[in-house]
Image (cartoon, grey):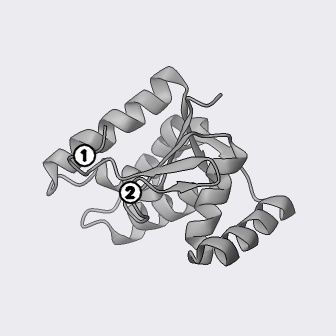
Amino acid sequence: MRDRFFLDTNIFVYTFDSREPKKQAKAQDLVADALTRGRGVISHQVVQEFLHVATQKFTNPLSESDALLYLDRVLGPLCEVLPTLDLYRSTIGLAARWKYSFYDSLIVAAALKSECAILYTEDLKHGQEVEGVTLMNPFLKSAK
């Protein structure tokens, strides 16, 4: 299913960031598309990172009940990639070949494992193709 896309943690963070209205709107559109059309994928890493940021670092952190609701309604349905030894092996190889950090490589490995064509992220080089996955910063004017 090459029309699938992977969402990095920062996409979910921006859905709550009213200080950046354009980024917030784009992020909300991506998450809505992921959920309604069933094309979006995330990994356990995205779930962990988002819940940490949302409950500990937001200016107005999510309450326990709001975090659980978001987990059940948004993150859970999108989470298809769980940690395995093969995922970590792939991560180590990607980090060595592409010189990315371990955690960036783990995101790319998860996108590859889930057979996504696009990885939406603000953290890696826009437009670069990594072993079949195209890295896209959805917040750039040139992004679709």
In the figure, is residue 105 to the left or right of 119? right
Residue 38 on image: x %, y %: 55, 25
Residue 107 on image: x %, y %: 59, 60
**The one of 13 and 96 positioned closer to us in this rendering:** 96
Amino acid type indicated by mark 2: His
Residue placed under numbered mark 2 in the picture: 126
Residue placed under numbered mark 1 in the picture: 142
Q: Quadrant of the C terminus?
A: top left
Q: Is residue 108 above or below residue 30?
A: below
| Dot 1 and dot 2 residues touching (CB under 8 Å) | yes
Amino acid type indicated by mark 1: Ser
User: Which tag, 1 or 2, sits closer to the chain's start?
Assistant: 2
In the figure, is residue 73 to the left or right of 15? right
Q: Quadrant of the N terminus?
A: top right
In this view, the residue farthest toward the right is 85
Q: Is residue 126 above or below residue 117?
A: below
Quarter where residue 88 is shown: bottom right
Residue at 23%, 55% in the rendered image? 17
Residue at 41%, 63% in the rendered image? 125
Residue at 67%, 73% in the rendered image? 97
In the figure, is residue 49 to the left or right of 102? left
Q: Is residue 33 above or below residue 62?
A: above
